[in-house]
Amino acid sequence: MKLYRFLTADDTSAFCHKVTEALNKGWALHGDPTYAFDAANGVMRCGQAVTKSAPGEYHPELKLGDQ
């Protein structure tokens, strides 16, 4: 099956660590990263889509972060 996640976080090193952790777990970058101002919280936010092929069949209860 093909898995998809969209990682988001404030623009800090924590976001880079989140993406790096996903890459080291076998996820691959998908598309360009995003960067936008969150006016409600007054911070810049980052986003990056990642994909991964995994055995088995998809079901909505699947915990994508555990893959």
Image (cartoon, rainbow, N blue to C red):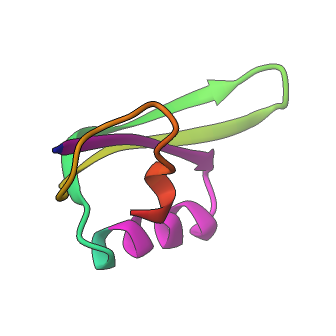
- Asked if the stretch drawn in magenta spans residue 19, the answer is yes
Residue 33 is situated, as x and y percent measured from the top left of the image, at 33, 41
In this view, the residue farthest toward the right is 41
Residue 12 is situated, as x and y percent measured from the top left of the image, at 63, 61
Q: Which residue lies at the image location 46% right of the left edge and 45% below the top edge?
A: 62
Question: Is 6 placed above or below 17 here?
Answer: above
The quadrant in which residue 54 appears is bottom left
Question: Is 63 placed above or below 25 here?
Answer: above
Q: Which residue lies at the image location 29% right of the left edge and 70% below the top edge?
A: 23
Question: Is 52 placed above or below 36 here?
Answer: below
In this view, the residue farthest toward the bottom is 24
Q: Nearer the viewer, residue 50 or 16?
A: 50
- Region in magenta: 2-22
- Asked if the stretch drawn in magenta spans residue 18, the answer is yes
All told, the count of numbered labels is 0
Q: Quadrant of the N terminus?
A: top left
Q: Quadrant of the C terminus?
A: bottom left
Residue 31 is situated, as x and y percent measured from the top left of the image, at 19, 38
The quadrant in which residue 58 appears is top left
In this view, the residue farthest toward the top is 39
Residue 10 is situated, as x and y percent measured from the top left of the image, at 66, 48
Q: Nearer the viewer, residue 50 or 44?
A: 50
Question: Is 39 placed above or below 13 here?
Answer: above
Q: Which residue lies at the image location 60% right of the left edge and 39% below the top edge?
A: 45
Question: For this view, does 16 lie left or right of residue 41?
Answer: left
Q: Which residue lies at the image location 17% right of the left edge and 58% below the top edge?
A: 55
